[in-house]
Image (cartoon, rainbow, N blue to C red):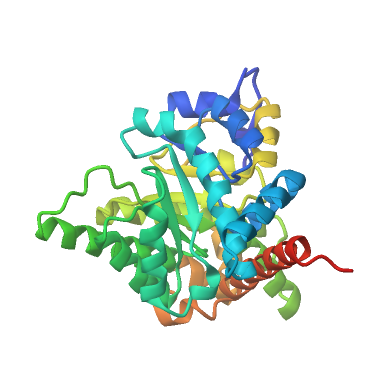
Amino acid sequence: MSDAHTTTTTVDSPLLTMTRTTPTALWNDSADPAELSTAIGWGAVGATCNPVIALAAIRADQPRWEARIREIAAELPTASESEIGWKVVEEVSLEAAELLAPVFAEHGGRNGRLSMQTDPRLRRSATALADQAEYFASLAPNIIVKVPATSVGVEAIEDATYRGVNINVTVSFSVPQALATGEAIERGLRRREAEGLPVEGIGPVVTIMVGRLDDWLKEVVERDGLDVDPAHLEWAGVAAVKRAYTLFRERGLRARVLAAAYRNQLQWTELVGGDLVLSPPFAWQQKFQDSGIDPQPRIDVPVDPEIIASLERIEDFRRAYEPDGMTPEEFDDFGATRKTLRQFLGADEELDQLVRDVITPAP
């Protein structure tokens, strides 16, 4: 297996080179204003927020947000801790959306969006998810809303798309999840078109959380005592994105594939060149900027068949890689899905606790 694609040359800005010379878009996996401003200078044309990211942004400027929490609590005297916390999440998100507004105007709505995530505590109700998605979309013209790729989420994604909401599929790690949600978006778009409703300016994306798939498979290998080359495990998420990207083009799905949750450099260098979105956390963007790598188009270069054969010894890789590897009902029990939902729910609980400590401090 050759590593020729990681050869470095003198490049002033690897990320700017990518965004200026290929159709690949860069989004920032953070809503922190300082990080986002820097990323925009590197060519970023989007950003994201979720319970974990929002909590990090609040803690990065905690005195300011604690003061705002007190103000919101006074303005909404009957609001719960959760309601106050989510008002803060809205404000964090809208600040980031404002930074992206010029990009949004320049790109006609396809980029320049800030992703807000639906409350994971609503995950059991498709109607509640679609209603919140519609509400979030009303907050600013350039909001795109995250809905999970679960059995309930697939239904909510179609409904919200039909209502005119730009969707960013989340809690998604596999080719079957990407296809099921991409097709749900298509159904929503076609319903709009059949009723003469506009679809211009709708720019949905379907995320595959590449690093979280890798993380889960590493756990499975350790748990089951499987003999798999550790280096091959770094390619699982890359392989899933490449396959999903190919299938989206073959099937004419209008949503773009988005790669997120980075764990290694391959998740950048191997995915450059296509009409898709790469959304690394800011720390990974900094590493890519400092790498000196000249990013070359490799999205259409297949993963080494030897690596795929090695990974296919893991049942959960086969489930994640094969287009029919899981049904929507099976998405909910996939290990990476459970772990990620629990992390998002945990961040919700931490945000509740932060609000509680501000409005009802310990004696």
In the image, residue 58 sits, relative to residue 322, either above or below, namely above
Q: Is residue 69 visible?
A: yes
User: Residue visible at 55% across and 76% down?
Assistant: 334
Judge by depth and name the residue closer to the eye, 211 or 317. Answer: 211
The spot of residue 215 in percent (x, y) is 67, 63
In the image, residue 347 sits, relative to residue 1, either above or below, namely below
Left or right of 157? Residue 353 is right
User: Residue visible at 42% across and 82% down?
Assistant: 329
Left or right of 360? Residue 196 is left
Q: Can residue 210 be seen in this view?
A: no
The spot of residue 156 in percent (x, y) is 36, 70
User: Residue visible at 72% across and 80% down?
Assistant: 224
Q: In which quarter of the image is residue 55?
A: bottom right
The spot of residue 82 in percent (x, y) is 61, 68
Q: Quadrant of residue 78?
A: bottom right
The spot of residue 271 in percent (x, y) is 50, 43
Residue furthest right as drawn: 363
